[in-house]
Image (tube, helix red, strand yellow):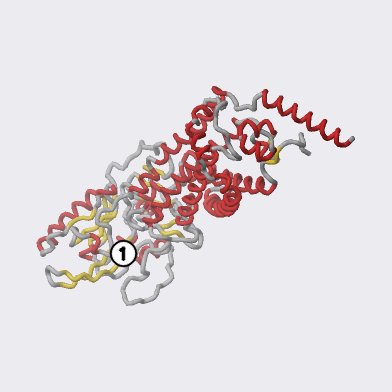
Amino acid sequence: MRRNPRDLVRYTAGERANHWVVGICFILLALSGLAFFHPAFFPLTQLFGGGPWTRILHPYIGVVMMLFFVIMALRFWRLNVIEPRDVEWLKNVNKMVDGNDHDMPEQGKYNGGQKVLFWGLVVGMVLLLVSGVLMWRAWLNLPVDVVRIASVVHAIAAVWMIGLIIMHVYAAIWTRGTIRAMMYGTVTRAWAKQHHRGWYRKMTGDN
Amino acid sequence: MSLQSLDIKRLSATTTPAPQARSPQSGEVAKLIDVSKCIGCKACQTACMEWNDLRQEPGHNVGVYDNPADLTENAWTVMKFTEYENEASGNLEWLIRKDGCMHCEDPGCLKACPSPGAIVQYTNGIVDFHEEHCVGCGYCVTGCPFNVPRISKKDHKAYKCTLCSDRVAVGREPACVTTCPTGAIMFGTKKAMKDQADTRIADLKERGFDQAGLYDPAGVGGTHVMYVLHHADKPSLYAGLPDAPKISPMVSLWKGMAKPLAMAALGAAALGSLFHFITKGPNEVSKELEDEMDRKDREAEAGTQEDAR
């Protein structure tokens, strides 16, 4: 039951489910990966049934995340092609961060920041996938120099990704009325007009 | 396996110091392998298997003496045979090197290991794997400059030479040392082994091996298994013994600077977000827009009622 039948559908049930499969996998991967990255986080292996189980599970969870991320990226990439108005938005991003979004340029379904985040995640995922497979000793035993480079790339890409996801989650919390879009699919018209006016006009025909 | 009663100097994935009150007053230990005295009999391989209860499946003869062909989780030491045509002297030299863990003073395996206490370094210098804490990730293989640790296909634990830490702990020498029929493998304090090496090197030089020398590579802080080589200028002649081993810069970056930098960056992102929220407040939809939409909602509702009539 929608609170207001005139609310706008931002994400279909399929898109939401897809997003959360990736999201849950990402959280599990971040926790288990940090456990192996820094001794301070090694106790996180207890969440996965101990050290050996964490080592066994981490790469398989990674494969699941990659499959669903590919599907999600195929769903959304067209909406994230960067346009001149996004560049304009990005030039003014400091005003946005300052909490003053009055004269930000009009945005479509995604703003410049969201689009940059999308492509940042794509790059990070590719690096994680390639380096992760190279490190997967249960299946592969590659030349040690390759594994060493892969280990460094995997760590850097993972930190990059966790950083981007912290930004992603914070942006959703900071911008009120956003989280419901990914929980049950709709946003209010006022939210749409304020944050994504181009998308609002396309969806409603109003100005 | 933790069968020993030795004091621990360093533990893997541990950021605080190990207990330090006790230290070996007689100095650290070392094994000295005099390659020039080795006859390639493989008694050391047999003694190692016997003492450690290991049984490597016999390999296949592929026309060389090496058997098994390489270190495995069940073969912690392996004789490596190299035929070297010495152009300077015109001799064919049969170089035989007992391969195995070098027990580095600065061990790449220990540096790379993510599991607290799975790899330890004792105060006497021996580097040991405690397999009950091993998670099977293989980072020790990635970290080792000598390609020594092996992950078992059966239990996914890492294994390598322990320098018979269980024997050393009760005042005995490693099994390979006891068994070596020519005295090519010796064991004692590191200082005593260096002194021993000096006399051997002097002897070799007298006999025409000008480049004879001790292999105790400084790049890994020295090792607790050392070789006397007739060609110390070219260690790689001996079945690829690294000329200048050191922990790879990739491993140093991964297990060094990357850790504090990453933690600082992620901490800053999380705390920065929190403080942004409490200083700037949430990004709300304006009251003006909400009122406008309420008005439009009512108009739309009135419109549908009009249509219904």
Q: Identity of the amino acid at label 1?
A: Thr
**Image quarter of residue B254:** top left
Residue B142, given in percent of the width and then of the height, sits at: 39, 53
Q: Could you tell me which residue is drawn at 9 percent across and 61 percent down?
A: B206
Camera-nearest residue between A144 and B298: B298
- The residue identified by callout 1 is B179
- The chain letter for the residue carrying disc 1 is B
Q: Is residue A199 left or right of residue B114?
A: right
Q: Is residue B54 left or right of residue B239?
A: right
Camera-nearest residue between B54 and A87: A87
The image shows a total of numbered marks equal to 1
Camera sees residue B85 = yes
Camera-nearest residue between B285 and B221: B285
Q: Residue furthest right?
A: B309
Q: Could you tell me which residue is drawn at 64 percent across and 27 percent down?
A: B285
Residue A102, given in percent of the width and then of the height, sits at: 57, 26
State the quadrant of the C terminus of chain B.
top right
**Image quarter of residue A11:** top right
Residue B36, given in percent of the width and then of the height, sits at: 20, 64
Secondary-structure class at tag 1: helix
Camera sees residue A43 = no
Circle 1 Cα neighbour tier, 10 Å, few/some/many (<14 / 14–19 / ≥20): some
In the rendered image, the vertical position of residue A34 relative to residue B154, given as above or below: above
Camera-nearest residue between B280 and A190: A190
Residue B181, given in percent of the width and then of the height, sits at: 26, 67
Q: Could you tell me which residue is drawn at 16 percent across and 69 percent down?
A: B86
